[in-house]
């Protein structure tokens, strides 16, 4: 398969370090708020890349961090009068719920920056020993100019950067040897979380966190490093500088970056205030619609969010769901007729059906061709729609149940690679909901909070949202 590599600015054939295995590191969110749908874009597209690689038989070690120490987290903690870890723990849990709703699989490991401080101290110590870093009054800086390859990812020239940085120079940074130098460790301010280190009681810079977490869980050289395109410079450039100077080997072979999710053609971001959280979208749509919307464009193309595109995504996804629904009905009818289960077995199909199954193979071939071409999910979805059309016209009452079952299996296989769930959820009846709510109340009374939470989560998975009000528990369908 080919991947576009930001480092070489070319599509390259993917060759893993170890045959059959892939190591991926994806920069995760800073957890101080509910994630917005811009943050959801890298989650969905790289989860899809992972699923496709697994489908191709690779064993994928997928690591994605949570940045749980940061100015924004600290500010939020001060605002609420709680400690920083109360904030990060809360929003990690919320983020995981959103991921589950978007059918983004948990990473093999989700490291937390705060749990990796010893590794960061080791890497910084090593960089100082080699002359790549220096300590001024407890702040440690990376000596950017000493790394001759600095700028190779963002294709920036050091001298251009230097003149840009001069203008940007802010007070408090005059202790740096060079405006290009960046922070590896900074001393604590009052009320901030801190760790003991040889240079000061303080905390790590953001860039060193990812270098260390990638090294810890994936090794010195990894196959793929990914994230949003805003991270190319300076975050990923700095990660390369730290890791390559410290480890003495290339950091990542392939660098993948998703384009922005925009709104009114501007980047959706928390600082601009023009964002929707994943939770906002969930109020109105099943999050499969959001996933479909994200995958309907190539990950390197900017994607503009609008109510109209969400509506058309909803309708398009519904066409897939309806097609599978119809196949389910046909399979059920065939089962009733033959009084037993239908097997998805080509040898039980008629000769004509077998010829049709041969014809059906072209859609999977197109799907794979698209995905092999730098994960072109837009074209892969188009291939699924061709398959849907085939299903809608070729599978009729006159066909065997096995034929219907094989076509259905094909649709589900391809949709599963995209992480799209296209089987309609069974409708939960009002009395079932009421019964579960009563059971949850009883569990709470008996202080069995685990069971109470389990029921809430089960209902949530079925699209039922509970609200605890003064008048008792109220529920609504999402
Ligand atoms: P942050 O929490 O800002 O560090 O972002 C977490 C991830 O979301 C990073 O990979 C960002 O590049 C990505 N990201 C943030 N905003 C957007 C956006 N509007 N479109 C696409 N990706 C984004
Ligand atoms: Zn990172």
Image (cartoon, rainbow, N blue to C red):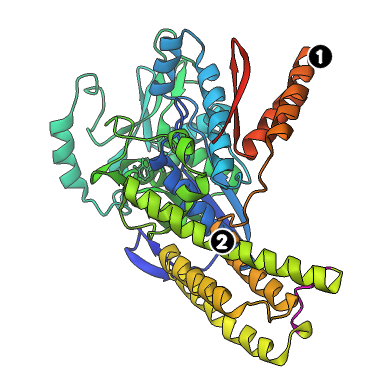
Task: Specify whether 409 is left or right of 145.
Answer: right
What residue is drawn where x is 69% and y is 35%? Answer: 458
Is 55 contained in the magenta span?
Answer: no
309 left or right of 471 in image: left
As drawn, 171 above or below 433: above
Is disc 2 surrounded by few (<14), some (14 to 19) or many (20+) residues within 10 Å? some
Residue 112 visible to an observer of this rendering: yes
Judge from the rendering whether residue 180 lies leftward or rightward of residue 140; answer left or right.
left
Q: Earlier in the sequence, mark 1 or mark 2?
A: 2
Determine the secondary structure under disc 1: loop
**Number of other residues with Cα within 10 Å of mark 1, as a class: few under 14, some 14 to 19, many 20 or more:** few
In the structure shown, which secondary structural element does the residue marked by tag 2 occupy?
Answer: helix
State ligand 1's quadrant. Answer: top left
**Numbered circle sitting on residue 61:** none
* Residue corresponding to mark 1: 446
Which segment did they paint magenta? Answer: 341-346
Q: Position of residue 358 (x, y in %)?
A: 62, 86
Q: For marks 1 and 2, give the CA distance.
A: 43 Å
Closer to the observer: label 1 or label 2?
2
Q: Position of residue 245 (x, y in %)?
A: 42, 45
Occupied quadrant, residue 146: top left
Q: Nearer the viewer, residue 174 or 343?
A: 343
Disc 2 target residue? 322
């Amino acid at each position: 398969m080919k991947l576009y590599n930001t480092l070489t600015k070319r599509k390259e054939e993917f060759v893993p370090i170890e045959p059959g295995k892939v190591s991926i590191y994806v920069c995760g969110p800073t957890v101080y708020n509910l994630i917005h749908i811009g943050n959801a874009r890298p989650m969905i597209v790289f989860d899809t890349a992972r699923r496709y690689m697994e489908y191709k038989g690779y064993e994928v070690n997928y690591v994605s961090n949570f940045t749980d120490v940061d100015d924004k987290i600290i500010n939020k903690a001060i605002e609420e009068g709680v400690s920083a870890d109360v904030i990060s723990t809360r929003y990690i849990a919320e983020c995981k719920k959103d991921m589950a709703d978007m059918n983004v699989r948990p990473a093999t490991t989700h490291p937390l920056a705060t749990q990796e401080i010893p590794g960061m101290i080791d890497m910084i110590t090593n960089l100082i020993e080699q002359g790549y870093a220096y300590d001024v009054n407890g702040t440690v800086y990376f000596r950017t100019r000493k790394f001759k390859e600095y700028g190779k990812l963002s294709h920036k020239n050091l001298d251009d950067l230097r003149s840009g940085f001069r203008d940007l120079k802010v007070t408090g940074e005059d202790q740096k040897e060079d405006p290009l130098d960046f922070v590896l460790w900074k001393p604590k301010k009052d009320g901030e979380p801190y760790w003991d280190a040889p240079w000061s009681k303080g905390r790590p810079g953001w860039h060193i966190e990812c270098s260390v977490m990638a090294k810890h869980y994936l090794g010195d050289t990894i196959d793929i490093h990914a994230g949003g395109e805003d991270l190319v410079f300076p975050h990923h450039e700095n990660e390369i500088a730290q890791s390559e100077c410290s480890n003495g080997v290339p950091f990542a072979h392939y660098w993948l970056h998703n384009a922005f999710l925009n709104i009114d053609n501007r980047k959706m971001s928390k600082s601009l205030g023009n964002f929707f959280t994943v939770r906002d979208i969930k109020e109105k749509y099943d999050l499969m619609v959001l996933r479909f919307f994200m995958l309907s464009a190539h990950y390197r193309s900017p994607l503009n969010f609008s109510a109209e595109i969400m509506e058309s995504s909803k309708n398009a996804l519904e066409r897939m769901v309806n097609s599978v629904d119809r196949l389910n009905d046909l399979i059920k009818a065939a089962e009733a007729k033959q009084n037993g289960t239908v097997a998805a077995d080509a040898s039980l199909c008629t000769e004509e059906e077998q010829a049709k199954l041969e014809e059906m193979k072209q859609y999977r071939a197109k799907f794979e061709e698209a995905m092999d071409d730098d994960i072109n999910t837009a074209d892969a979805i188009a291939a699924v729609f061709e398959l849907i059309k085939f299903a809608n016209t070729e599978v009729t009452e006159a066909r065997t149940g096995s034929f219907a079952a094989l076509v259905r299996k094909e649709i589900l296989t391809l949709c599963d690679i995209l992480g799209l769930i296209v089987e309609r959820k069974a409708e939960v009846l009002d009395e079932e909901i009421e019964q579960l709510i009563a059971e949850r109340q009883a569990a709470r009374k008996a202080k069995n909070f685990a069971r109470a939470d389990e029921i809430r989560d089960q209902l949530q998975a079925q699209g039922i949202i509970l609200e605890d009000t003064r008048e008792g528990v109220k529920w609504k369908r999402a």
